[in-house]
Structures are given as structure tokens and as C-alpha cells.
Amino acid sequence: MAELIDVPPAAFEPKPLFPTMEAAAAVVDEVRDWIKDQPTWAWRGHTHAKPDTDEAEEIRYVADFKLPAGIECPCPCCTPRHAKFGQGFIAWFPRTRCIRLMGQHCFKRLNPDSHAAAQDEYKARMKHNGLVAFLVNNLGNRDAFRRAIEAATPLALHLDELQDILGEKLYRTWKIRLWDHVQTGALGLPTFDRDGKPDHGFRVYATIAGSSLIDPTRKSFAPRLKTALNLLDFRIPEDINAANTEELGKCVAPFSRSEKIARETFAAMEAARQFVSPLTTATIREWAKQPGAPVQLDIRRSGDELFVGKSEENRSRVPLRPYINRGPSGLPRLVL
Ligand SMILES: [Zn+2]
């Protein structure tokens, strides 16, 4: 049996100090601060007497609290003199205007219906509070999100264009299926035996970044950014605090989704643009010159131009936009 705790009689006296839910909510910070180094039953507003049947008919869970690690306190509902709980509720009893600091599941046995109703109300209120906080913290950045997405759109269009130029068009013009050779990110070469004959082995000549640029199954970037932009067109309720959960959800859900799409697309764009970098194109060019290279190919980056084809004499010129040299940026972080 756990040790008996000497709870003084004053703790058991009713303290009807809280006429309203607002009055109860006003002491949440005080309680959370108190329980850091003081027992729950010694807090000035706590009533340690067990609620009677009538009082137990109505209860509201104002807020939760967590006792420091390893600390447990006695519960007014079930174990008034023995340590019982570490995760607590600040529970308000409207009929007596009292507050009890008690275990989160303790009240269930006293009155299952009141407990269930209080728990539902608490969860709904927490959800509502979370949505309000999300909007208060992030709405100020909505225009910054729009600007960042708009600023990245020309690069997205350019990368989508290059997917076609270095994919389908390259094949049509030069019969080169570049994707087949770069899709793993590793440029392979055959190996040779001592007599210089292919021995059916394989070695990795080099690895390259950004081959996703020309992945024929890659979803185009620009339409994804357009989707992200459109999702930001949600209507904000005039009074956020007064709006219901459904109204708030119609802002928070598209806002979060927009941010997720934009962030993922930005990251994918940043990766893809590496494919036409001077380093990557030089690596591919050198690889294609190696003995046994599986494709006849010449690719060269020169300033803002890319040349690609069968050889230096037989190749196409692909103009690159200067913004290919910088990744997309400026997307604010969501505050959660
Ligand atoms: Zn209890």
C-alpha cells in the first residue's frame, strides 16, 4: 500500500471561487505554475472533498496539466490520501463553483455520462483553439507564401520544358534515350578482362544529381505550384475567434495543404535543376566518352546555353533561363 499522505482539513473545504468557466480558465497558468513544485491539494483554489451525486452531474475539463516526472498526487474523487495520478485535469464544477485538480480518468467512475460529455467538449474546444492558433500564427504570412510560389513559377515552367526537351524531343531528334542511362543516378560502364574484351561486368563511373528532371513519369512542377497558389484563396471569417470549427477548418486545411505541396515541389525543383548544372553535364559528357559507354552523346553547358546531341557537330542548342542557377526560395515556415 502506498504511503498515506497527510492532507490538511483545509484542503477538503469547498472553495466556491469560480462562478464561470471564464473564471476557471483564468487560473490555468497559475495552476500549471504551482504544480511544478507544490502538491495539487495545497493550491489555494483546490477543493479536495469528493463531489456528491448532485455536484457530479455537471463537470467541465478546463485544461490539462502534467505533474513533474516521478511525482503523483492524491485524487479528490477516488484516492484523497494516496498518490494516484500524474496527468491531471483542472476540473470545474458549475453547480458548486469549485475547482478540483484531479486525475484525467478518475471522474469516469463517479459519473460516466458527465465525464463523456466533458471530454467531448474538451476535445472540441482544444481542436477549435488549435485552429484559431494556427490562423493567428500564420495568416500574416499568406501573402508571403503567394509571392514565393509566384516567384518560383517561371523556374517550374522552365524545368517542365526541359523535361520534354531532354526527354521526348531529344529522342525524336537524336534517338537518344537519356533517361534510360541516368535514372538510377549512377552512370554505368561495362568492365573488360585483361585482353580488353567485355567481361559482362558493370561498374559505376560516377553518380549525378537531378536526374528526376527528365523522369518521364515526373509530375510537372508548374501545375502543382498553381494548385498550391489556388489553395491559398480561402476566405477568412471576419472574427476568427467567433468562427466555428468547420469554418476554421475550411481555412486551415487548404492552407496546410498548399504549404505541403509548395514545400515538396520546391524541394523537387531544387533537386531537378542540378541536372543541367555545369558539373552534372560535364560528368555525363566525360562518361559518354569512356570506352564501352552505352550511348553516343555529347552534352555541354556553356553559360546559359546547353548543347546536346550525338556529337559536337551534331547537337542541338537549348537556351537556359538565368534563374536555373538559383533554387526556389522564400517559402515561410508554418508556425504550428
Ligand atoms: Zn481519482
Image (cartoon, rainbow, N blue to C red):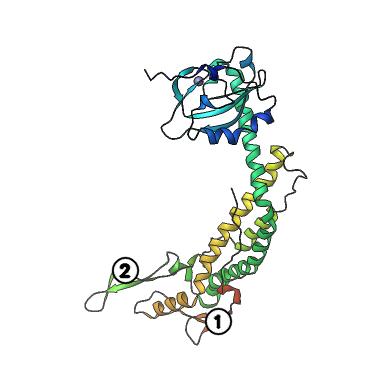
10 left or right of 197? Answer: right
The residue positioned farthest toward the left in the image shown: 194
Count residues near mark 1 (Cα–Cα under 10 Å), then give few for <14, some for 14-19, many for 20+. some
Q: Is residue 125 above or below residue 331?
A: above
Q: Seen in the image, is 307 located left or right of residue 208?
A: right
Pinpoint residue 288: horizontal percent, then vertical percent. Answer: 41, 78
Return the residue at label 1: 316
Residue 224 appears in view: yes
Question: Does residue 259 lie above or below 206 as drawn?
Answer: above
Helix, strand or loop at disc 1? strand
Q: Which of 171 and 114 is in front in this view?
A: 114
The residue at the point 74 percent across, 47 percent down is 236
How far apart, in angstroms, are the residues tagged by discs 2 and 1?
A: 30 Å
Q: What residue type is labelled 2?
A: Phe
Left or right of 23: which side holds 40? left
Give the side of residue 158 with respect to residue 77, left or right: right
Residue 104 appears anywhere in the view: no
The one of 9 and 118 positioned closer to us in this rendering: 9
* Of 286 and 155, the residue lying toward us: 155
Q: Disc 2, ligand 1: is the CB inside 8 Å?
A: no
- Residue 293 x %, y %: 38, 76
Residue 40: percent from left, percent from top: 51, 27
Q: Position of residue 85 (x, y in %)?
A: 47, 26
Q: Could you say which disc has been placed on residue 242 in the image?
A: none
Residue at image position (63%, 15%) is: 55
Q: Residues within 10 Å of mark 2 (few under 14, many from 20)?
A: few
Residue at the disc numbered 2: 202
Q: What residue type is labelled 1?
A: Ser
- Give the secondary structure at mark 2: strand
Q: Which of marks 2 and 1 is nearer the N terminus?
A: 2
Give the farthest residue toward the top: 53
State the image quarter where residue 153 is shown.
Answer: bottom right
